[in-house]
Image (spheres, rainbow, N blue to C red):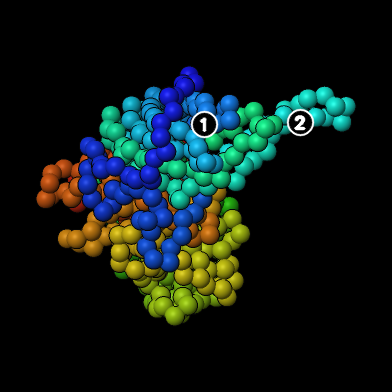
Amino acid sequence: MRRSHVLAPLLLVVVVARGQSPPGHYHLAGSLRTLLAPGASAGEATGGVAFAVTLTDGGSAVSDDAAALASPAFPQPLHVRLDSLAYGAGHLTGRARFSNDSGAILEGLRLDLDSAQEEYRDKDDKGQEVLRTRLQPARWDSPHLFGDLPRGAPADTLVFDVGGLGFVAATAKVAVTFRLSGLAYERGVDVPGAAVQQLDVDSTGRLYVGDTVGNCLWRGPPEGPFTKLAGLLDQCVGMAVDRKSGMGYATVTSNRLFQRFDADGKDLGNLTFEAAGVKGWVHHLRADAAGALWFGASGRLVRLVDGKIAWSLEKLGDEDIEVASVDFAADGSAWVVSGKGLFRVSADGKTVRQVATGDDWHPGRLYAPAACEVDATGNVFVAESGKEGEEYWRISQFDAEGRVVRVFGRAAKVPGAEGALLEGQVHRPVDLAVLPDGRLVVGCDTQEGGLPLLVFRPF
């Protein structure tokens, strides 16, 4: 329903104090530009639900359609309240407040200015009056984060100022569109008795779990239940699925070999490290689109093709290699978590770029990164283990260029010190997986309780 507003005086850009949301460094809210670590930049958010503020009569009349925002990611609409809307001197100002009546836990909420479209009167080639559209150079200071919202909780009130707008005699109206994006916590899933070491997904969307307690690989739909696919010779330390062939690989603690399985879990024989030319121990596996295996081994990043080393790196730039996780972009390049940093490595291993590093809670820094995963649009999710006793777990999201999109995970409340885990709280993340439909699965260590798999649906 479109609503009209009584015009108010122009407002200063201020964020009012937090209401009922829980405090904590990992529950960030405010202008993303002011929250970023030095040297980091804000990236583009994908997806989202849109609403518009429309200016007519030279800007003297203001209305909006933001009463309720619907998305397949949550069962009920998310309610938005806009008030004190006003236009003057090329600026639209007002206040926005979100109330989470969606029925879902919403995490990493972010508000972007999408566009400003002017509708104006013009003449066609026959001299008849027509309405045409064009974009105006709308701008504001930065995307805004609202953090993580439990069911029924309000977010901070955002006081916003959008500049670059204007009216001429021919202008009929200007529609300023905003976009709210984030992730809805969908469910926690149990894998009874399992301790997650690594996750992967096949081409049909089935989820694979490398179990370091049960010494096996599990497989099932993301909602569960899971069945045991294959037994391992010892504790799982690495696991990968080749989405092209369906073949599975695993490495274990006590044997210097790759165990190999077909799509039904049938043993296809082992490939020894010696036969592959691999020195040391392999502790993380991932298969790229061509079926090549990437992994870390004794301070090296290795790419294995047809059972032989195609190339290996001893350094990522100037940094020693401690591979914790690898995943791939559409162009075949790899995103690599190593040591304290996130790196982009070309498919041939010749080009390396460091994207983020450093023990710091500001977005754009990584607190003990543990895993990374890339979605179909190029977004890179990084699970952070935090600094024990000081900072706790979260997920940082970067865009395809390595710019910061958001952080989330509800990790403001510390288990043990203040009670049980919150619903939808990321706890000791060990690996990530993105499903074909875009949902994100976080694999967690459950020593503080909770469920080993948390499923989030981006919107």
Residue at image location 45% in from the left, 50% down from the top? 142
The amino acid type of the residue labelled 2 equals Asp
Quarter of image, res 290 = bottom right
Tell whether 126 sits left or right of 224.
right
- Position of residue 230 relative to residue 154, above or below, is below
Residue at image location 80% in from the left, 29% down from the top? 123
Residue at image location 49% in from the left, 54% down from the top? 43
The amino acid type of the residue labelled 1 equals Ala
249 or 368: nearer the eye? 368
How far across and down, in percent of the image, does residue 51 sit? 50, 31
Q: What secondary structure is found at the residue carrying circle 2?
A: strand
What is the total number of numbered labels drawn onto the structure image?
Answer: 2
Residue at image location 17% in from the left, 60% down from the top? 389
Q: Name the residue under label 1.
A: 52
- Could you say which disc has been placed on residue 122 in the image? 2
Between the C-alphas of marks 2 and 1, the distance is 24 Å
How far across and down, in percent of the image, does residue 156 sit? 31, 39
* Contact (Cβ within 8 Å) of mark 2 with mark 1: no
Q: Which label's residue is closer to the chain start, 2 or 1?
A: 1
